[in-house]
Amino acid sequence: MQSDPTLRLRVFDLNCWAIRYLSKRRQERVRLIGDMLHREDFDLVLLQEVWSEQDYSDLKVKLGGCYPFSHYFRSGVIGSGLCVFSRFPILDTLLYQYSLNGYPYMLQHGDWFCGKSVGLVIIKISGIIFNVYVTHLHAEYCREKDAYLPHRLVQAWELAQFIRHTSKAADVVLLGGDLNMHPEDVGIRLLRGWTGLQDAFAEATHFEGCEDGCTLVPNNCFTDKSELLPFPLGIRIDYILYKAISSFMVKCEELKTTTGAAPGMDIPFSDHEAVMATLHIQRQAQATGTTLGTAEPMLADVVTEAQTEVGMGLRAAQQQRYSSGRMAVLALLLLLLQATAALGALVGLDAGQPFPKLSFCLLGFLAIGILVLATGLHLFHTMEVKMLHGTEEQMRMVLRTLQERPSDG
Amino acid sequence: MQSDPTLRLRVFDLNCWAIRYLSKRRQERVRLIGDMLHREDFDLVLLQEVWSEQDYSDLKVKLGGCYPFSHYFRSGVIGSGLCVFSRFPILDTLLYQYSLNGYPYMLQHGDWFCGKSVGLVIIKISGIIFNVYVTHLHAEYCREKDAYLPHRLVQAWELAQFIRHTSKAADVVLLGGDLNMHPEDVGIRLLRGWTGLQDAFAEATHFEGCEDGCTLVPNNCFTDKSELLPFPLGIRIDYILYKAISSFMVKCEELKTTTGAAPGMDIPFSDHEAVMATLHIQRQAQATGTTLGTAEPMLADVVTEAQTEVGMGLRAAQQQRYSSGRMAVLALLLLLLQATAALGALVGLDAGQPFPKLSFCLLGFLAIGILVLATGLHLFHTMEVKMLHGTEEQMRMVLRTLQERPSDG
């Protein structure tokens, strides 16, 4: 078995920043991305933020020759933005939409409308089953006071759980995407620890690209320089992660990133840098048991850390649920009061009219508006509380199992 | 290997109809259910519509002795209502919330608020891995003109996909729940055909209970008799389904249903009858390959039938998206017109005031109200279109694969 030939797989990952009407020079960049993918001839292409189905269709037409198989994942109002192009047949697909993904009323952020998800495509190459996952987690808008951290942690947890549960028959697991987390963030440690996925950047024999493998760099003309001020080299938030299950071994031979402007052009492909990995996959003589990525006592620490953050998010969500519920009750009381006053005026209990009609009506409409909005908010935060609570409990269950198991770390 | 002892597993499934404030004699029935479960000592209990966490906690306390392991699945505004009690340790859990589940504005139906889902618990008994799924699909309110059929079909499809993708390392798969589909409905045939699950009622060596295995019967004092008029025996919509993967064999030795009033009581446990299966699980000498439940040409017919229904749902959703979008645009136009008129009056362009102030304000508020509601509806139906479209495309992909594969049916 040791003499089995090595399979060489070239994987491309990019957050394309292709938001209709909002992303600068979108069509030109999508064309450039298509040209480059056509030229470079990767085996597997994982894209995020392809939010226009027309862009996907255009890419599909252009790349049909070299990547005959592709899949676009639909979800949310705008779409998940996730798609995959492959040189090898896609056998099956599955989409898992994260249960929490920001707030619908945070229109300026808009993550909620994208229905952020993880997409799975199953591919078989030379008899080896690849479970390929592509995802995009909730953005981080303010690192110092990150209101979305609990949601992103729930997503990282659901991503890990989804990978664990769906990859049991896979030989090789690949995950590519914009995780919106720095390499040392608790979410990444949780994801890697709980799935056993390895970071292609950290494992690569050769590396070429932006320093420290950064994928959001000041050098890129589309990035917001002020956001990157605390990180003069940039940040690394786009990843290719992998692991072999059963009797296979995966090695990252080479990792590259783009470095700002596309070759021969004045603009980069996107505001993110692309990540390109060359993986070597070989059958092993002896099957290694499935292992977790992190020694168990350390994993327990990571899960505890994540659970604490989710717990803090839970308390904040409970507070918001309470406030919106109280607001709805107050609006309802005001309406009842007005109804009583109006009724009183009708049956002639009041001598004079306490309010002019117009103000009375305006107040009534205001109360109805607040009642509807506050009720909607209350329902939304009730769902948020349910999901945070459920995740916290799942984590607690895992911790119990980790602590009960005889340590082999 | 043939001499391996047979594992006998007793499974209980019930839609408990335990909706706070709405279900009749809820607390009394939950107590009765707890007493019976305690007395009967099943191995695995799958419950639906346990919508109050307090009811779950009470059951957990009462059943702690005989079912030391349990899990409650949280989702949606009200909760998924799903929970599992087990005599054996639960190793892991996962929740998948269906992407479509009715409409939030259908308050009288309320399915949307439950966040209907499928819950998975993994259990190991005598070294055999059981993937146990519990679910509850969207209700059918009018069989003749079932507006929710496309949503229920999307749920059946997602359920089948979820089971297929997560059960690859399982030895035995069990599914229990209220599927809200009659045995010959396209959704059940799709689910069974695409997963290979077998119907415990159809396979049982011995059967005892309501005629035809019905689980919603006129004999039950809580059922709505008028709804069951076309079905004098009742209908069968609650199931225990199973299959063995790899080298195991499962047989249903006995299937029972309750038959109205609980023994010695004047009321039944619920408006549904419980389903109780005794399964025999044995290791086989020779591993049988994983097979689909239905011969492939027949499966292709079922998928085509489902795809047609989903396609019809897609067109209806597109129509609703269009109507709500048009309504939002009209409301916006009315508001703009009013703004122009008000501005005109302010700068003195109009000699007299065309409207009395009050009517003008009322009209403005009406327009704002319609704009907000229509925009909300438009966003919702856009998501609906995305998910129906995605499912239709997945089905088309499966059909292509089925048709390309050399037939072995």
Image (cartoon, coloured by chain):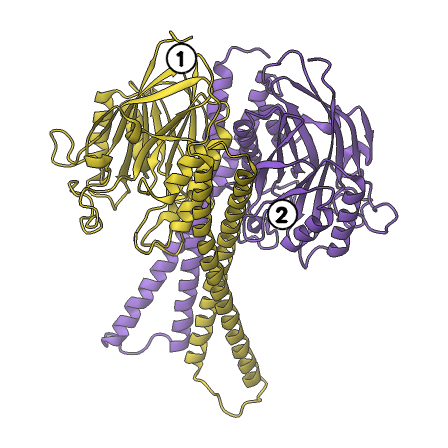
Chain colours: A purple, B yellow
Q: Residue at x 17, y 40 (%)?
A: B220
Q: Disc 2: which chain?
A: A
Amino acid type, mark 1: Ser
Measured as percent of width and height from the top left, residue A12 is found at 73, 37
Crowding near pointer 1: few (<14 within 10 Å), some, many (20+)? few
Distance from label 1 to label 2 (Cα)? 44 Å
In-front residue for pair B386/A255? B386
Does residue A286 lie above or below A329 as drawn? above
In the orientation shown, which residue stands out farthest toward the right? A264
Residue on which the image places disc 2: A81
Amino acid type, mark 2: Gly
In-front residue for pair B83/B393? B393
Measured as percent of width and height from the top left, residue B82 is found at 36, 35
Q: Residue at x 69, y 53 (%)?
A: A58
In-front residue for pair A149/A207? A207
Give me the disc on residue B20.
Answer: none
**Quadrant of the rendering where the N terminus of chain B is positioned:** top left
Q: Are marks 1 and 2 on the same chain?
A: no
Q: Is residue A128 left or right of residue B323?
A: right
Q: Disc 1: which chain?
A: B
Measured as percent of width and height from the top left, residue B262 is found at 16, 32
Residue on which the image places disc 1: B126
